[in-house]
Image (tube, rainbow, N blue to C red):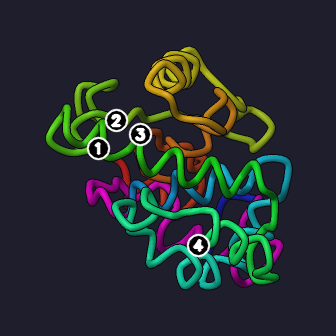
Amino acid sequence: MKRCTWANHSELEKVYHDKEWGVPQHDDLVLFEFLLLEGAQAGLSWLTILKKRENYRQAFDNFDWQKIANYDDNKIKELLNNSGIIRNQLKIKSAINNARQFQKTVDEFGSFDQYIWSFTQYKTIENNWKKHEDIPVKTSLSDTISKDLKQRGFTFVGSIIVYSYLQAIGIVNDHLIDCFRRQDLSV
């Protein structure tokens, strides 16, 4: 079975690629989970985050942004002492801030799904990459969304992080043209 080359380095990456990466997501809980995890991943490998994902799920109340938005200094201290997650104060505070901004966006648009998918008129962008090296790390779309998120007060949402997010949640289908998942996810 041929898959995207990046996914062949570990079993965790294979499973993530085969079952989740690029699948169009419309559940706000899942959309927030990926937003939190992509921010945590900044400067690190995705494999590092995948290994810690269940720890994140436990530490961050199953990615319930409404609970996370209310975290206080005591909870921040608890998270900074949790060896199961990335203990970076800026990233932890960003997760809390982004939970608050996420809620504001939900309040404005009815759901984060409505907000994030509106940038592509609720359609997946189908790319036709032959090699992993051809895939860009950011695009004009990720630039636009990054700028909008920052204006809304989100942090750790630079264009590169946003592009990874768009790939993960299926707004962009960047499975290579010979990857078995490409056909499954093509619209």
| Rendered-image quadrant of the C terminus | top left
The residue labelled by disc 3 is 101
| Rendered-image quadrant of the N terminus | bottom right
Q: Is residue 92 found left or right of 98 in the rendered image?
A: right
* Rendered position, 19 above or below 165: below
Q: Nearer the viewer, mark 3 or mark 4?
A: 3
Measure the alpha-carbon separation of dots 2 and 1.
6 Å
Q: Amino acid at mark 2?
A: Ile
The residue labelled by disc 1 is 112
Q: Nearer the viewer, mark 3 or mark 1?
A: 3
Q: Residue at x 56, y 56 (%)?
A: 36
The residue labelled by disc 2 is 116
Q: Position of residue 121 (x, y in %)?
A: 23, 25
Measure the alpha-carbon separation of dots 4 and 1.
23 Å
Question: Which comes sooner in the sequence, label 4 or label 1?
Answer: 4
Measure the alpha-carbon separation of dots 3 and 2.
13 Å
Secondary element at image label 3: helix
Measure the alpha-carbon separation of dots 3 and 1.
10 Å
Q: Residue at x 41, y 39 (%)?
A: 101
Start-end of magenta stretch: 6-29
